[in-house]
Image (spheres, rainbow, N blue to C red):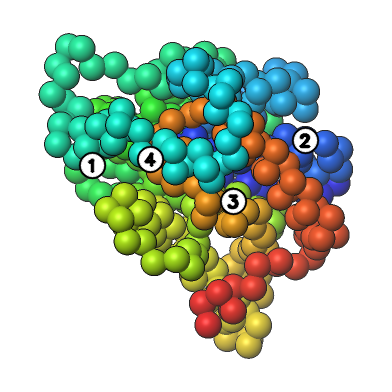
Amino acid sequence: MRRINLALQGGGAHGAFTWGVLDRLLDEPDVEVAAITGTSAGALNGAAFKAGMVSGGREGARSLLDSLWRRMGAQADMRLSAWMRALDASHLTRFLEHMPIFAAADMATRLVSPYAYGPFYTNPLRPVVEAFDFDCVNACSGPALFICATCVRTGKIRVFDGPEITTDAILASACLPTLFQAVRIRDPKSGRLEAYWDGGYTGNPALFPLFNRDLPDDVVIVNINPLEREDLPVTPRQIQNRINEISFNSSLLRELRAISFVQRLLEDGTLERGRMSRVLVHMIADDALMNSLSVATKLVPVPHVLTTLKEAGRDAADRFLSAHKADLGERSTVDLARMFG
C-alpha cells in the first residue's frame, strides 16, 4: 500500500480539476490518502472526500464529490449551459469575460463592499457546505483533514482540524473579501471572536500540518493556480488575475523553498538525518489548461467547464500515476533545486 498526503489548492470553480484528480486516485486500490490539507475549493474537495470515505469508502467518496460539484454547477444559470457546450474552455473564457453582466459584476466587486447589502446579504456557498455530514467530516477515522483560513486581524494562518471543522470554518477558508463578508469564528485559546478571509492569502494550502511522523513522507500537491504564464498580462482583468495567482501561490512557494533548503542540508550532511521529517514532493497540474482560463471561469461555475476540468484532472492524475506511481515512498518527483535555482 502506498500512503500519501494530499495538498489541495483553492481556485474557485477551477477546483473541479481537483475533483477529477481525486476521482482518478480513487481508482487505485493500493494508494491510500492518509491526510489532506486544503484551502477554499480545496477545503470543499477535502471535506467531501473525507466524509465520503468515512461513510461509504471509495465509492462513497466518489459519490460525495460528484454531488458537491453538481451543487456547485447549480449556482450557474443552467439556461446558458446547452449552447455553451459548443465552445471549448478557452473560447468560453473569452466570451464570459466580455459579457456585459460579468463586466458589471466584476466592476461591482471593486466599487461595492459585500457589507453594503445589509440584511439582504447571503453567502451562496452556505447551503452547499451545510449539506456535508460533519459527523463524518470530523470523524477520527479516514484521512486527517486540515482546513486553512486567514485571520483578518493578525494576517496569520489558522488551520482548523478535528471538531473545529464546521460549516463556518470551510466558508472562512473560501471567503474572498471582495465577494463575501468575513466569517467570524471564536478562537478557543483566546476566547476572542475573530474574522477570517480566504486561506489562500496565507496558505494555499499550508503544508506544515502534514509534517507529522505519523503521516507518510509523500506530499502530492494538486496545483490549480499556474506557477508560470508566458504571456505578459496587459488588460486590467489579466493583470488582476495574475496578481491573484502570484499572491495565492506565494505561501506555497515559501514552504517548498524551505523544504528544498532542508533537503540540501540533509544531502550535504550539515543536518543529521532523522532530526527533520523527510518530505517527498510531487505535483499534479495542467498549467497549459489553466493558462487558457481566467478569473471568469473561476467565478462562474458553468457545468460544461466543470466537466472539462474534471476530465483534465483525471487525465493529469493518470499521467502522474503512469510516470511516478513507483516513485511514491522512494523519491520526490518535483525538482525543487531546479525550481528555486
Q: Earlier in the sequence, mark 2 or mark 4?
A: 2
Q: Nearer the viewer, residue 151 or 274?
A: 151
Q: Which residue is mark 3?
A: 289
Q: Nearer the viewer, residue 142 or 59?
A: 59
Disc 1 versus disc 2: nearer the observer: 2
Q: Which residue is mark 2?
A: 26
What is the number of the mark on residue 29? Answer: none
Say if 231 sits above or below 265 in the image: above
- The residues tagged by marks 1 and 3 sit, at their Cα atoms, a distance apart of 33 Å
Q: State the residue at coordinates (78%, 54%).
A: 319
> Could you tell me which secondary element the residue under label 1 belongs to?
loop
What is the number of the mark on residue 152? Answer: 1
- Amino acid type, mark 1: Val
- Amino acid type, mark 3: Leu
Q: Earlier in the sequence, mark 3 or mark 2?
A: 2
- The residues tagged by marks 1 and 4 sit, at their Cα atoms, a distance apart of 30 Å
Q: Quadrant of the rendered structure where residue 198 is?
A: top left
- The residues tagged by marks 3 and 2 sit, at their Cα atoms, a distance apart of 23 Å
Q: Which residue is mark 4?
A: 97
Q: Earlier in the sequence, mark 1 or mark 2?
A: 2
Q: State the residue at coordinates (59%, 68%).
A: 276
Q: Residue 119's spot in the image, x, y percent?
A: 17, 11
- The residues tagged by marks 1 and 2 sit, at their Cα atoms, a distance apart of 36 Å
Q: Residue 222's spot in the image, x, y percent?
A: 60, 49
